[in-house]
Image: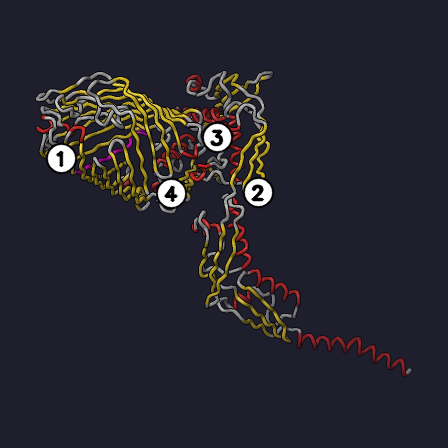
Amino acid sequence: MYLSLRLKIILFTIIYICPIYYTHAQTSDDIISNIKIEGNQRVELDTISSYLNISSGDVFDIDKLNNSLKNLYSTGFFSDVNIVRNGSVILVQVIENPIINRVVFEGNKEIEDEILEAEVSVKSRNLFTRSKIQEDVQRILTLYRNEGSLSSTVKPNIISLDQNRVDVVFEINEGENTIINSITFNGNKEFSDRRLRDVIITRQTRWYSILSASDKYDPQQLQVDENLLRKFYKDNGFADVDIKSAVAQLDREKDGFNIIFTIDEGNEYKYGEIKIISNIVEIDTKSIITQLNMEVGDIYSAGKIEKSVNVITKFVNEQGFPFTEIIPEVDRIENKNELSVIFRINDAEKKYVNRIIIRGNERTLDKVIRRNIRLAEGDAYVPSLLARSKTLISNLGFFSRVDLTESSTNKEGNTDILVDVQETSTGELSFGGGFSSQVGGLLNLGISEKNFLGKGQRVSLQAKFSEREADYTASFSEPYFLNRDLYSSTNLYNNRIDYKESSYELERQGFNVSGNFSLSEYIRQSIRYSLESRKLTPRTGASASIVSEKGETVLSEISSSLNIDTTDNQRLPTEGYTFSIASAFAGLGGDKEFLRINNNGNYYKSFNEEAIIVNVEYNAGLIMGLGQDILISDRYFLGGNSFRGFDQSGVGPRDKNNSDSLGGNLFYTSSIKTSFGVGLPPELGIRANWFTTVGSLTGVDKSTVTFHDDSSIRMSSGVGISWNSPFGPISIIFSQALIKEDYDRTEAISFGIGTKF
């Protein structure tokens, strides 16, 4: 009985009293009474508290403390975090990451600081973390590997400063560039290794490789080369070509790569059938097919099909059908190595321009780009106008890259146009020199900005000196005067030219103002006014006709011209034509009165992917005095650069007594010029040129002296080599006057060397 009672007391204590004690213990020790934070300098207490999963009054929970620890580390604010429990108090101890004072790169020569700064993630005033530093080391190494420097190393050096700041210094050892020892091709039967090497950008290392960077191994470039090879084959009849692999093998010495391309050429195809089928009755397909640069029996070319699509699209758009799509269908003709090509012209969904978004123009104002876009928001979307817009924006010369693409929108039947540009340097401080067989030594000094204040305005100050000439010019041009399509320019000049071939010196000071405006997409009209003071000083022994013109005169002239330009690139045209006709009247208060008419034109055509460029050019001019003789300073001269094969002013009227060149009132020339490669790698910039020129110069008003003058035709032909070298353009031309008069002056060799810094 007694034992039973005692057992009951023990059980009662275990069941009821112990839980009460446990609850009391938890309440006093396991409830967090306070959270203290130590070590923070910049990070606010509230910010740290917001990352904690605990707060005062909570029950102590080890999992919540661990999560709080992870949260604080994940912020990147701290290099060390420690959370300690001291009874009911939680102590949070932090050591803040330092602030980066500056980021410095040392030892880099191949890659500029600006490129490295853009690549790394650590920046001045950012928080320092070692993980980001290591990531940036890998980024820098990747940059160098892409440049062909596989042996480069990067060591981060952290320099501690006061106020918990650090300098980050990336010490770079660029190492040696990994060169390309050989490039070989397997499976190529129709084209030699040498021919295929000319197609790709990657180059074997040669003695002249110091002039180029294309002999450095770049894994990404190999992918581009694969595409270039594929395009080359498809443009030369091999529609089924397969570039199976492009492998880079490191040689035994590990100082260079051997590149191996494996190719399955497939069969060569020709066009067996070419058709244009339109579901729009009003479109004349017969007129279109005559404009295509492809015929039945020609070697198949994927590039020609792509160009034909553009030709058809442009033709159809200009005929008033903007909502069309051109679909080329290429099918194999059974049992023949021939392809059938059908261009289908279909009605397309009506599409309008929603927004035009311009990106990448940090300096150039949006309006400068937008006014060259031939589409506006709300217009019908016309692909040919988009292509034309790209040409116009590229012609500005402000951008190294211009891309215009479509972008889908949430609005049905609408598309956005994305204009992505990459700006290039538009300012130039130049100091140049050279030598020419025409004018002797040359020195050019200048400062210019062709995108002044990002408005597309051009400002220029130039000075040019040679044995023949001293010239000073200041100019300003505004392409959109009064916010209209009105190009205006003003020029001030002061020059002196020694015309040794005519035994006189001419000094000129003056200015001209001009404006031109658009009449249509490719046609512009211009008007110009010039006012000029001139002083002619004859040399001893000069022709009597020149001596009679000694002294000062004033020229006041107004002129107008009509200009057509359909070329693909105004600076380096390869397709299209130009035409210009100009008339001028001198008088208007000046000493001399005359009428002048000038006319010139150019036609450009390229072949074999611009490997060959043909240019047909003609020039003509006529000047007529209004009751007065034409002064020598207003006449035309031919020779030198204007008529190869003849000396400066070597063609046309000449004084019989002292052989002074007198110039002429009428001239014409016509030339055909061909530029082509010489079998050397294109990156060397060496091209050959062939030309033939015919023309004549005649007509002198002076009758007080006896002179030679014959309107007979002259002809010359020649070849030349031009090199766009790293030191400036270098050219040498060998020419011969095939048809000439006895009194003409010829020049068999001319050359020029120039540079600009």
Could you tell me the amino acid type at mark 3?
Asp
Count how many numbered circles sit on residues in the image: 4
Asked whether residue 429 is drawn in magenta, I would say: no
Q: CA distance from mark 1 to mark 3?
A: 54 Å
The residue closer to the viewer here, 629 or 650, is 650
Callout 1–callout 4 Cβ contact below 8 Å: no
Q: Which residue in the protein does label 1 denote?
A: 534
The residue identified by callout 3 is 198
Q: Which residue is mark 4?
A: 424
Say above or below: 332 vs 75: above
Mark nearer the N terminus (3 vs 4):
3
Quarter occupied by the N terminus:
bottom right
Say which quarter of the image contains residue 612: top left
Residue 520 lies in magenta, yes or no? yes
Upstream in sequence: badge 1 or badge 4: 4
Q: Nearer the viewer, mark 3 or mark 4?
A: 3
Q: Nearer the viewer, residue 40 or 633?
A: 633
